[in-house]
Amino acid sequence: MDIDPSTTKYVIKADLKASGVVEKPDVVGAIFGQTEGLLGDELDLRDLQKSGRMGRIEVEVSSSKGKSSGKITIPSSLDLVETSILAAALETIDRVGPCKADIEIDEIKDVRESKRNRIVERAKDLLSSTIEESKVPTGNLTESVRQEVQMEEISDYGESHSPAGPNVDESDAIIVVEGRSDVLNLLRYGIKNAIAVEGTDIPDEIKDLSTKRVTTAFVDGDRGGMLILQELLETAEVDYVAEAPENTEVEELTQKQIMKALRSKIPVDQYLEMYDIDVDEEEVKESGGYQRAKKAAKGKQASTGKSSSESREEQREELGTKKEYDQYRKLIDSIDKEKIAKLLNGNGEVLEEVPTRELADKLLEKDQGVEKVVFNGIVTQRLVDIATEKGIKKLIGRKVGNIPKLPTSLEVLPWDRLKNN
């Protein structure tokens, strides 16, 4: 069938059945003869063919055992409504030549839909071949350009050439991450003050930066991240800790995950308490946490005008008699490695035992007559603030964290000081 692709919109397809033997001219004649004047001048089939709005009628017919059957195909450039009317008119034909006949419309096919389908399939082929050749997915072109710019923004900081964002030198806060890919991912979302340690051997430049800037350690949510955090805590002055979700890495995070992790960062002393992390003081006597503790002690000494030895002596005197020392030692021995806290009244009687992790919340409850607390955990600034508010006199913890603000009304002691006196 010859169909003019520039004009044809639809193709009418019909089935023919005749009770006798008929041929193609008989079918064409019946179509023209029995539709003439039926639909008015506007839809006269002969006029439509002359004007090119209807194509040539194609008929395929065959005869068997005295009966005929076949297919009728008529291309149309009319709109769908007019084409449907003309198709319906074909079904009114009841004779072909001398024989009774029946014509039934099979379908009106949208030629343009077929073209669109071919276009889509061809476009898929072209797209696939183009992507295969370029190896760059078209949907990621913007991302590719952005990454190229970010690569240019990464600098090599200091003698160790640590990968860093462009604002590390200028910002008053830095984010310490594990590797170059982490810095790149933060750059992708506009965070330009990150610097990478690239291993557990922390570069001196980062240690030095941490003493001058507010420092957040942003680590992976796996064992490697914990190892790097441990090293940072022992060698640098970390102020906050942020973690990627469990079993994920900073370089894999989406913008939403990054922002959520950074907004949820935890002060380092609170983090140490929450996760019961020990920092080896013998190895880090000149490192971050230890240095901050020394600064706090010097500040307290300057405010009182007393030497550290005088302050320690006064603290021992204020602690009380040998009997009281022995009482605290016994409490410490009874706690041993259990993560519990014992709340005492002014007479040293145990009022209640609570898990260490619930201590802060318990103290925040209404006044319970608690004056002393002995617990297996780290004394943090938060606990000091709560104890001061509640009128508690002594906090005795396994270790003492960074406490820049210690009121004179509260005594804070680590276990080892009691055991060694």
Image: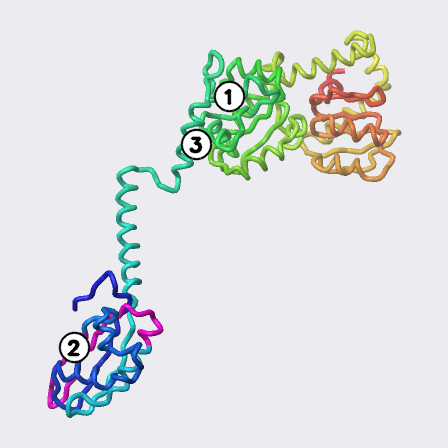
The residue lying toward the viewer, choosing from 150 and 374, is: 150
The quarter holding residue 68 reads: bottom left
Is residue 386 placed above or below 50 in the rendered structure? above
Res 312 label: none
In space, the residues marked 1 and 2 are separated at their CA atoms by 77 Å
Residue type at numbered disc 3: Arg
Mark 3 vs mark 2, foreground winner is 2
Could you tell me how many numbered marks the image carries?
3
Amino acid found under the numbered disc labelled 2 = Val
For marks 1 and 2, the one nearer the N-term is 2
Q: Earlier in the sequence, mark 3 or mark 2?
A: 2
Label 3 to label 2, Cα distance in Å?
A: 62 Å
Where is residue 101? Give x, y as percent.
Answer: 21, 88
x then y, percent, for residue 183:
48, 27
Contact flag, marks 3 and 2 (Cβ < 8 Å): no
Q: Secondary structure at mark 3?
A: helix
Which span is picked out in magenta?
A: 57-84
User: Which element is circle 2 on?
Assistant: strand
* In the depicted structure, whether residue 25 falls above or below residue 95: above
| Residue that numbered label 3 is attached to | 146
User: Dot 1 corresponds to which residue?
Assistant: 166
Label 1: how many residues lie within 10 Å, few (<14), some (14-19) or many (20+)? many
Task: Give neighbour class at mark 2: few <14, some 14-19, many 20+ (Cα, 10 Å).
Answer: many
Q: For the residues carrying marks 1 and 2, which lies nearer the camera in this image?
A: 2
| Labels 3 and 1: the sequence-earlier one | 3
- Residue with the mark numbered 2: 59
Q: Amino acid at mark 1?
A: Pro
Locate the N terminus and report the quarter of the image it occupies. Answer: bottom left
